[in-house]
Image (cartoon, rainbow, N blue to C red):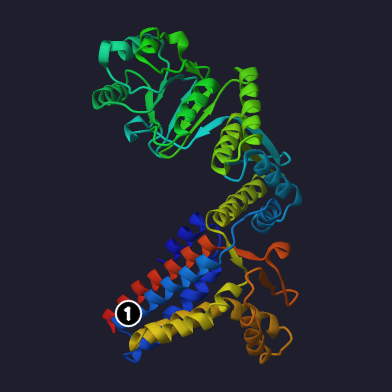
Amino acid sequence: MLEDCFQKINSISGDGTKTFFLILAYLVLNGFKSLTQNTYSLETKIGITKTLNYALKVLNDKSLPISTEIFWEKVLERYIPQDENLVNIFKEAFERIGKTGQLKIRTETGKKSNLVLEKGMQISRGYFSPYFTTDKKNIMVQFKNPYILVSLQKITLDDNYLIRLLEPIIYEKRSLVIISSDIDEQALSTLILNKINGILDIAYVKVPQTFLFDKTVLEDLALYTNAKLIVSSRDWKSMQKSNLGQVNKVLLTKTKSIFWAESGLKEELIERKCHDLKQQILFSDSDYENEKREERRRNFTGTNALIEIGGTTELESSDLRSRSEIGLLGARACLYEGVLPGSGLSFLQLTEELENWSRSNLYGNSVNGSKLVINSLVKPIQTLIECQVDKNTLLPQSLSKLESLAKVQDIYLSYDIKQNKVKNIIDSGILDSLKGIRIGLQTATSLTYSILSIANIII
């Protein structure tokens, strides 16, 4: 069970396994004491759950968003392996693709680490049905050199326009991706049957026209892929295979679609479109509209990054890749939910507030459960301080150090255990992701319940 939990934390947040283990160990050991003293009950479990939920709420309110480029660079330095060249490559990659861009990592033994950029357009809509997937293991669609059909109109089988368009593509044995605002059930069933029976490699992506800027997604995609945009029945009548768009490759997941077109394809039109969007941003007062226009402009010029991890031997490059992938998970976890002071200081800052809250909201054995959580949260930073103090054989100092650190309530400060100083969270890069903390705490309490439930039955 413990191994599964470690793997879960590493795969989701890429950080926090040591903190998880220290908190879990305290909860389980003291939970056993409660069992032997007959003080562990359902109320204790309720106290643990309520205190944990309140602690996560407070931490969420205190978390700092990654709001500046300097802050983001410090986050990368904190999580990416301590290789100056590699850190700079990651910084350049995110500078080119944005913080949420597509980034892949692979090993290149015998070479230096390198950054490769691929141009591509991404939309935040994925395949409509899993029946379209070509990679069943990773649940995604991958096509090479597919045709692209883009329509603002609902896809139907009326007047056989669609069937007439599909026939030459079937004979050519090329794949097809259809993107539209809607599709009727009969047309969808026809596409799925063609896919399942191996008649045509096809996929469908639905982009509903719910908001003002949804229409522009299809317009931009038609421009990028050099496809004729279908806006009326007249367009359907004149639609030929030559009017379809084409790209080098397509990747569709459940939540997003990425298109890679030939370099130079409609480049002048795309540059002109980007220039127009930039001008609209300059002369518009609407922050919302400008944000959407900037997203569109970035999507036209957007790139996808591939980081090639080099090394003298295969073992070295594989190890560096593994640590880079875990570090990337940790860095992106900071983006999703923000960051908190590192070294367990954020937990220590919580203790007084949690004690006051538990006295006001809990009673009976549930207070014991709350105390278990509060004391367990102190363990990570207490362990760090004790390890540092042990070197100087000054054990009594650990308690006084904890008391002084507990008074630090500034969320922009974290504790540097090596230099024994309180430092700015951004300058020092000593930070933890809220996502990593949340996953670690929730997993620790969940496993504690399981272990104590089994122990309760045995005892």
Q: Position of residue 347 (x, y in %)?
A: 55, 75
In percent of width and height, residue 416 lies at: 70, 72
The residue located at (63%, 21%) in the rendering is 263
- Give the residue at x 55% y 30%: 121
**Residue matched to label 1:** 455
Residue 263, above or below 325: above
Q: Residue at x 37, y 12 (%)?
A: 236
Residue 326, x across and y down, in percent = 57, 54
Image quadrant for the N terminus?
Answer: bottom left
* Relative height, residue 235 to residue 139 (above, below): above
Q: Is residue 264 visible?
A: no
Rate crowding at label 1 as few (under 14), some (14 to 19) or many (20 or more) other CA atoms within 10 Å. Answer: few
Callout 1 secondary element? helix
Q: Residue 116's image quarter?
A: top right
Number of numbered markers: 1
Q: Amino acid at mark 1?
A: Ala
Quadrant (top left/top right/bottom left/bottom right) for the C terminus: bottom left
Left or right, 24 with respect to 404, comes to: left
- 443 up-or-down from 262: above or below: below
Q: Nearer the viewer, residue 158 or 42?
A: 158
Q: Nearer the viewer, residue 279 or 202?
A: 279
Extreme left residue here? 186
Q: Is residue 189 visible?
A: yes
Answer with the quarter of the image where residue 280 lies.
Answer: top right
